[in-house]
Image (cartoon, rainbow, N blue to C red):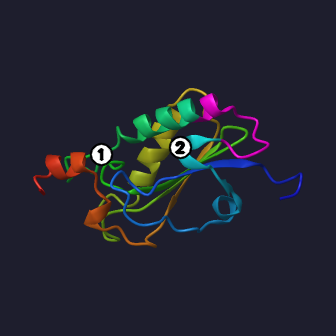
């Protein structure tokens, strides 16, 4: 990375159930250095470990307020969020998917996620990228989502 490239702190979210690795797509997201185990910022970050952990926790809580209107579980617990990337200026990139490419709210849900993340105090700009690689599968759901959907 050169001096003109913003440093990124990234939390790779493989979903609450831990299913599958997130795809590395999108120019700004692909250049980011990974955040090591549990939210530790990358070397040289201007965000302290505590700041990054709190901001990430607040972002996840905000995303958990977004629901697919046809499914009684939030999109985070469904495993639709693949990556949350926070840069040194507190700008947030979110990589997400949908349960199916033909989802009726495909045009709306990324906007809902963007609005939810933007509601978090301290967040700069938010960019939400939609991907279908890897495709979502039911194994990405958390136990909480499985319970809500009676899928045990």
Q: Quadrant of the C terminus?
A: bottom left
Nearest-to-viewer mark from 2 and 1: 2
Instruction: Looking at this view, name the residue that lies furthest to the top.
Output: 121
Report the front residue among 88 and 105.
88
Q: Which residue lies at the image location 62% right of the left edge and 29% below the top edge?
A: 51
- Residue wearing tag 2: 38
Q: Mark 2: few, some, or many residues within 10 Å (few <14, many ≥20)? A: few
* Element class at badge 2: helix
Q: Residue at x 87, y 52 (%)?
A: 4
Residue drawn 31% across and 48% down?
Answer: 77
> For residue 136, which quarter of the picture?
bottom left
Tally of numbered tags: 2
Question: Crowding at label 1, few (<14), some or many (≥20) Cα neighbours within 10 Å?
Answer: some
44 drawn magenta: yes
Q: Position of residue 47 (x, y in %)?
A: 70, 34
Q: Which residue has dot 1 on it?
A: 74
x, y (%) of residue 114? Answer: 50, 45
């Amino acid at each position: 990375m050169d001096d003109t490239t913003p440093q990124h702190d990234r939390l790779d979210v493989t979903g609450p159930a831990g299913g599958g690795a997130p795809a590395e797509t999108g120019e700004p997201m692909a250049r980011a250095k990974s955040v090591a185990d549990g939210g530790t910022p990358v070397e040289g970050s201007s965000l302290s470990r505590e700041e990054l952990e709190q901001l990430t926790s607040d972002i996840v809580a905000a995303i958990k307020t977004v629901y697919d209107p046809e499914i009684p579980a939030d999109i985070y617990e469904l495993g639709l969020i693949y990556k949350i990337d926070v840069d040194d200026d507190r700008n947030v990139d979110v990589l997400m998917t949908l349960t199916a490419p033909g989802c009726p709210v495909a045009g709306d849900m990324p906007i809902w996620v963007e609005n939810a993340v933007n509601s978090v105090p301290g967040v700069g700009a938010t960019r939400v990228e939609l991907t279908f690689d890897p495709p979502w599968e039911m194994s990405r759901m958390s136990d909480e989502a499985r319970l809500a959907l009676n899928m045990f």
